[in-house]
Amino acid sequence: MNRPRIGLWLGVAVLLALAAMAAAPALFTGTDPNATDVNALLQPPGDGHLLGTDQSGRDLYARIVYGARPSLLIGAGAVGLALVGGTLVGVAAAQLGRIADQVISRLLDVVLSVPGLLLVFLVVAVLGPGATTATVGLAVVSLPGFARVARAEVIGLRSKAYVEAAHGFGWTRTQVVLRHVLPNAAGPVLALATVSLGAMVVASSSLSFVGLGPRPPTAEWGAMLADSREFLAVAWWPAAFPGAAITLAVLAVTVLGRHLQHTLDGRHR
């Protein structure tokens, strides 16, 4: 038997903890994340406040716990939308004929030619700032990558013997796609989704950092980093702990995604 992979299990444990915080933050702290205390401004980590307080006297531990939900949901929502939309677009490009394939491929090239953050800023400028807008903008940026992977997988599967046999038995194109093509193409697309989640968490925090994420006083890791910039010379903890939360989330997702990719590559070989 192979020895357990410590890094993988640590990544899974971190993800489960963050998911639990996002789902039920009240289980981890009974402190109001938006409660201010003028007598505890920038208090260092200690007994009264485990991770210290910010410039408004708010408990940093409570804000990090409650900040897990918007920080992770924006990234996960963007990946989910891009996964579904990109898969549909990729399958359509591969299945609807050469002209449709060329048109869709050129449109994807156009989207990819625009810098990602610039495209997100364009979406936010049109729809207005907020968590939903950030999710949609990041999904639009990520969609071409999923579409290209799905298209390549479908094209590779079309020549498989079991797909040709299904057509020979009189199955419709839709039946073949739903029963044979999509299940076999799902692995690489899901692996890409896992790896992309880490990038989306960073991107969502970046949008909040520049004020394009959830509105104040909502606790969000990127916004907490932005608020701490003016106080770095006198207090390191308001920036260090939200930054550590983002780093841990990205590392955990990346480790899990890489493991999934290696597993799928081994099965293909």
Image (cartoon, helix red, strand yellow):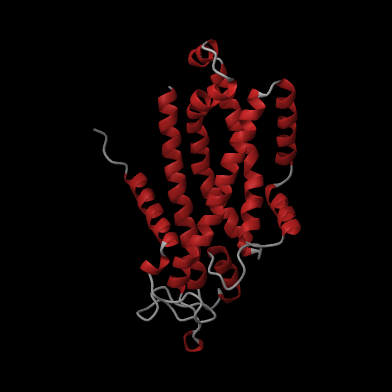
In the image, residue 172 sits, relative to residue 60, either above or below, namely: above
Q: Residue furthest left?
A: 1
Residue 248: x and y in percent read 44, 56
In the image, residue 226 sits, relative to residue 15, either above or below, namely: below
In the image, residue 38 sits, relative to residue 148, either above or below, namely: below
Residue 18: x and y in percent read 42, 58
- Label count reads 0
Give the camera-side residue of 188 and 198. Answer: 188
Q: Quadrant of residue 148?
A: top right
> Is 43 positioned to the left or the right of 87 in the image?
left
In the image, residue 261 sits, relative to residue 254, either above or below, namely: above
The residue lying at 47 percent from left, 72 percent from top is 237
Q: Quadrant of the N terminus?
A: top left
> Is 95 positioned to the left or the right of 111 in the image?
left
The residue lying at 55 percent from left, 52 percent from top is 75
The residue lying at 27 percent from left, 34 percent from top is 2
Give the camera-side residue of 234 and 68. Answer: 68
